[in-house]
Image (cartoon, grey):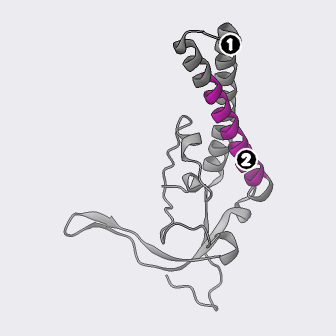
Amino acid sequence: MTYTKTSKAQEEIIALGNKAYDDSINAMMSTIGDLFSGIEAWNDVLESLGEPVEGENGKITAMRQEHVDLVETAMKKIKQVNALHDNITKRRTTPGQRAIGFVLHSEKIEVSVEPLKFTKDWALIELYNEMIDWATFKGNKVYIGTSFSFSRVALPSVLTDDFSFLHRR
């Protein structure tokens, strides 16, 4: 298939289908909930440690600082995830708002292609300029596939300016 201006319809590429979109939103909310639970637990520890006192055991001072740092880090991550959630739910709600381009050309799908017997299934996609922040884009590939793996635990640590963890792999 090759798209020409006389072709009737373009096959648009949607970054996250409906289920993956819903799963991502739910994962963001779960992550925020998990972080708030952690903050409550860390604050309980801080409360039990009490205020710093002069001459206290260094291990207690270190433990207090560790828990203060955990709370601060979690709050920063919550802020990041909230910002992403707000952006996604305001600007990428419908599949049309998540269309990143269209199929310009695709070859016929072939199975058991030599030498490794893999499936040959590829397409050349023309990306919509307004859907990619080219100044921060970190590569020449966008992975689009049929499976989506997402780890709530990993979410905060993989946040980046381009939020590439949301791309389907």
Q: Residue at x 68, y 13 (%)?
A: 44
- Quickly name the residue at label 2: 85
Q: Is residue 7 above or below residue 126?
A: below
Residue 98's mark?
none
- Which of these two is toward me, 41 or 123? 41
Q: Is residue 90 above or below residue 121?
A: above
Q: Secondary structure at mark 2?
A: helix
**SS assignment for the magenta stretch, majority:** helix
- Does the segment drawn in magenta span residue 68? yes
Q: Is residue 37 above or below residue 168?
A: above
Comparing marks 1 and 2, which lies closer to the viewer? 1
Furthest residue toward right: 90
Q: Residue at x 66, y 51 (%)?
A: 18
- Does the segment drawn in magenta span residue 11? no
Q: Residue at x 55, y 42 (%)?
A: 157
Q: Secondary structure at mark 1?
A: helix
- The amino acid sitting under disc 2 is His
* Residue 138, image x, y percentages: 52, 66
Marks 1 & 2, CB-CB < 8 Å contact: no
- The amino acid sitting under disc 1 is Asp
Residue 44's mark?
1
Alpha-carbon span between mark 1 and mark 2: 28 Å
- Over which residues does the magenta segment extend? 67-89
Q: Within 10 Å of the Cα at label 2, are there few (<14), some (14-19), or many (20+) other Cα atoms?
A: some
